């Protein structure tokens, strides 16, 4: 649960990546040991799982 405001994101893909990063930061702050994230963006999930370095998401994915 929660929300965060981000102004002027470049694309829906970037917005979803930012949401995942925020969720992981929140889970870490709460000392969660396990977290399950869902996304309908197969491209983003593949980028995370395969450790791809996409220019559009580079800084965000390096945080994830």
Image (cartoon, grey):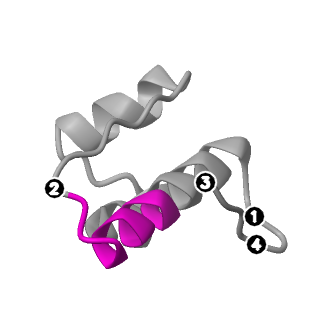
Distance, label 4 to label 1, CA atoms, is: 7 Å
Q: Look at the numbered disc 2 and give the secondary structure of its residue.
A: loop
Q: Is residue 46 above or below residue 61?
A: above
- Residue 28 at x, y percent in the picture: 29, 71
Labelled pair 3, 2 in contact (Cβ < 8 Å): no
Labelled pair 1, 3 in contact (Cβ < 8 Å): yes
Distance, label 1 to label 3, CA atoms, is: 7 Å
Labelled pair 4, 1 in contact (Cβ < 8 Å): yes
Disc assigned to residue 9? 1
Q: Tell which circle, 1 or 2, labels the residue nearer the N-terminal end.
A: 1
Query: Which mark is in front, 2 or 4?
Result: 2
- Residue 64 at x, y percent in the picture: 30, 61
Query: Which mark is in front, 4 or 1?
Result: 4
Q: Which residue is mark 2?
A: 33
Q: Look at the numbered disc 4 and give the secondary structure of its residue.
A: loop
Distance, label 3 to label 2, CA atoms, is: 26 Å
């Amino acid at each position: 649960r929660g929300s965060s405001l981000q102004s002027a994101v470049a694309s829906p893909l970037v917005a979803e990546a930012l949401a995942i990063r925020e969720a992981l930061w929140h889970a870490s702050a709460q000392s969660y040991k396990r977290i399950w994230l869902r996304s309908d963006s197969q491209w983003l999930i593949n980028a995370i799982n395969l450790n791809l370095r996409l220019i559009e998401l580079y800084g965000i994915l390096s945080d994830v």
